[in-house]
Image (cartoon, helix red, strand yellow):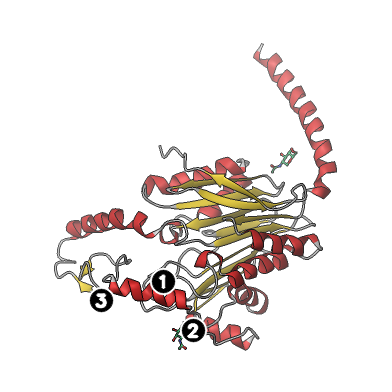
Amino acid sequence: MSNNSNKVDVTLFFLVSLIISTPAEEVRPVKFPLVVSTWPFKEAVRAAWRTAESGHSAIDAVVEGCSTCELLRCDGTVGPGGSPDENGETTIDAMIMNGVSMEVGAVAAMRYVSDGIKAARLVMQHTEHTLLVGEQASTFAISMGLPGPTNLSSEESIQKWVNWKKNSCQPNFRKNVLPVNDCGPYHLKSSMYLDEKLCSNTERVGLDESRSYHFGLHNHDTIAMAVIDKKGLIAIGTSTNGATFKIPGRVGDGPIAGSSAYADTEVGACGASGDGDIMMRFLPCYQVVESMRLGMEPKLAAEDAIARIARKYPDFVGGVFAVNKNGTHAGACHGWTFQYSVRSPDMADVVVYTVNPEISTT
Ligand SMILES: *[C@@H]1O[C@H](CO)[C@@H](O)[C@H](O)[C@H]1NC(C)=O
Ligand SMILES: *[C@@H]1O[C@H](CO)[C@@H](O)[C@H](O)[C@H]1NC(C)=O
């Protein structure tokens, strides 16, 4: 009896796949290009869409899209003029990945140059390296023709920083140091390394108190944008000016391949935004793409990656989108309501999808 039903199952399976795969082949040409981006960064998505629609590569479209966000200073957290660090300085993190060759180019903590995604592309296309950092990244970018040195501060970012200083430098990203409720210079608590147990307990308390305080909507938004071009080839890029009032030198998930973004033309792509200091410990986008490679639907792959972080850090704030090579997309998030934007041939304009944080963490 079970043999019989197996045979029926197998026959059904072939019939169904025949029915499904035939129209899919016909539909394919109008599926692409496809642009997916974190947040309602509509102008950026439109710019990428126009580029891909006119026949340019996924890489070019990603650069167009992310550059648009840098120029518009999307949410004040992409491009120049936002997210001052403890010294009031704005720096840039950006990354681009070619899902065909798996080449990556990235810049981190780049000073004095506002074109993050273009600098990342220069690293990818004109060096054998993957990641350049700090002032040396700026020197490289300028030597390769990007404008600079530029003052990346704005009236707004300086004002934000001045207010923060007035507020005794609260909130900040320090932990287990003195003074606790004041500006630096900071030093270790004297008993710090005497009792390891005490030390790790203290750390955990600091973490729980501070995480959700730092990261909210419009405080830490990275643009992560995936493009599937007309040929079905995939690229992804990110750009951000990082976390507000970060410790100078801090680099988040933005320029880390597999964390903020990942793409493989054979499978699909993933983009992330949120508490990068936590997310980069889990490489959520690498996990999403690998889950899809093993056959998981984008929705489940996204939820699984987020749930894995939430199990260890119940207070973390973040979201990911996943898109497979078919163009099926989904999102998942934790600790906030996440949004991502899509433009495809069957849409008249960009459509914004809202994802609610309804994820079981068990
Ligand atoms: C792509 O779409 C076709 C038709 O809907 C489906 O049969 C196939 O499994 C899909 N592939 C992936 C990776 O989702
Ligand atoms: C950079 O720009 C900010 C904001 O306009 C300004 O306050 C600051 O003095 C400038 N820095 C330099 C070195 O010119």
Amino acid found under the numbered disc labelled 2: Glu
> Earlier along the polypeptide chain: callout 2 or callout 3?
2
Q: Residues within 10 Å of mark 1 (few under 14, many from 20)?
A: few
- Mark 2 residue's CB less than 8 Å from ligand 2: no
- The residue drawn where x is 51% and y is 67% is 76
Q: CA distance from mark 2 to mark 1?
A: 14 Å
Amino acid found under the numbered disc labelled 1: Arg
- The residue drawn where x is 82% and y is 43% is 27
Q: Is the residue under label 1 in contact with that under label 2 (CB below 8 Å)?
A: no
Give SS at disc 2.
helix
Q: Quadrant of residue 143?
A: bottom right
* Residue beneath disc 2: 135
- The residue drawn where x is 67% and y is 44% is 328
User: Which quadrant holds the C terminus?
Assistant: top left
User: Which quadrant holds the N terminus?
Assistant: top right
Query: x, y percentage for residue 269?
Result: 63, 54
Q: How many marks?
A: 3
Q: Nearer the viewer, residue 100 or 31?
A: 31
**Residue 249 seen anywhere in this rendered image of the structure:** no
Amino acid found under the numbered disc labelled 3: Gly
Q: Is residue 324 left or right of residue 260?
A: right
* Residue beneath disc 3: 184
